Amino acid sequence: MSGLEPLMSIEELSEYLHVPVRTLYDWRLAGKGPCAIHVGRQLRYFVSDVHEWLACQREGRPGASSEGS
């Protein structure tokens, strides 16, 4: 099992990002949040997907949005 990538629950991601769980669901509906997988009826996030998504949210330079505007 040590070769498996860690997964985060939506509650863990909410705590990590300091945003409400509802916001994560809203981001999913809008196609804005990190990719998730369903494990049964629960959402889980690969840690690497969260890191990748966060990197894409980073400013290109201070004060610039992630889209470069």
Image: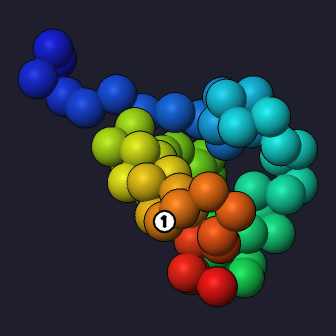
Q: Residue at x 70, y 37 (%)?
A: 17
State the residue in front, 9 or 64: 64
Q: Residue at x 85, y 57 (%)?
A: 23
Viewport quadrant of the N terminus: top left
Where is 51 relative to 57, above or below? above
State the residue in front, 68 or 27: 68
- Residue furthest front in the image: 62
The amino acid type found where label 1 is placed reads: Gly
Q: Residue at x 25, y 32 (%)?
A: 5
Q: Residues within 10 Å of mark 1 (few under 14, many from 20)?
A: few
Where is 13 relative to 31, above or below? above
Q: Position of residue 37 (x, y in %)?
A: 45, 57
Mark 1, secondary structure of its residue: loop
Q: Is residue 38 visible?
A: no
Count how many numbered circles sit on residues in the image: 1
Left or right position of 47 against 65: left
Residue located beneath label 1 in the image: 60
Left or right position of 64 against 53: right
Residue 69 occupies quadrant: bottom right
Q: Is residue 33 visible?
A: yes
